[in-house]
Amino acid sequence: MPATKEPLLTKASQPEEVDVFMTKLRHPLKDVTESLRRIILAADKSIGEGISWNAPSFFYTGKMKPFKPKEYKRFIVVFNFFKKDCIRLIFLRGAMVNDKSGLLQGEYTDGRRLAFFHDMKEVKAGEKALQSAIKKLVKLIDKA
């Protein structure tokens, strides 16, 4: 009888790691970052956080079917602080959302989509669309 593959282990959330990162963050839109972090975490109880690619990242914490690590199927969204006039959220598999709100932008061939936030007004205006996109991505995860 062939051996069955066990689902990947869950990934533990590391909020303390993100808290430390946030205390050291020097960005003009730190308040926007903090609000976006709260919104992302509130979208679904199965979302965890940690530091990946030198920024806060958010991922599914439950069991998943096996996949190649470089497919990044567990990850939902990652902050990008490259620009000083905005906070960019990178949705690694954002093309799967089929976003009609205009929140997710770009047509990257690898499936990424970006969301841009320049101030707290844009955070408030985009909160529902952001949570909707995250909830859709969580539903699409290949859970075990």
Image (cartoon, rainbow, N blue to C red):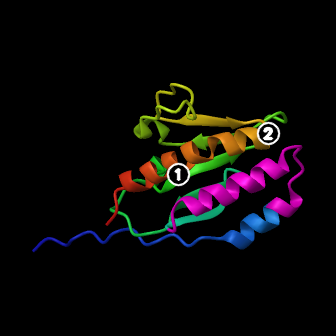
Q: Is residue 1 magenta?
A: no
How far from the left and from the top, in percent, is residue 23?
86, 63
Q: Quadrant of residue 17?
A: bottom right
Q: Residue at coordinates 52% horizontally, 54% vertically from top-left? A: 75
> Most extreme residue toward the top, as rendered?
107
Mark 2 Cα-neighbour bin, 10 Å: few <14, some 14–19, many ≥20: some
Residue 15: mark: none
- Crowd rating for badge 1 (residues with CA inside 10 Å; few <14, some 14–19, many 20+): many
Q: Please state which of residues 97 and 6 is positioned toward the viewer in this rendering.
A: 97
Question: Is 9 left, or right, of 65 in this rendering?
Answer: right
Quadrant occupied by the N terminus = bottom left
**For mark 2, what is the residue?**
119
Left or right: residue 56 compared with residue 101:
right
Q: Is residue 35 highlighted in magenta? A: yes
Judge by depth and name the residue closer to the eye, 126 or 141: 126
The answer to whether residue 51 shows anywhere in this view is: no
Residue under pointer 1: 76
Give the foreground label among 2 and 1.
2
- Give how far across and how far down residue 60 sits, in percent: 49, 62
**Could you tell me which residue is drawn at 55 percent across and 42 percent down?**
129
Which SS does the magenta portion mostly show? helix
Which segment is the magenta one?
Answer: 22-45
- Give the amino acid at mark 2: Asp
> How many labels were placed on the picture?
2
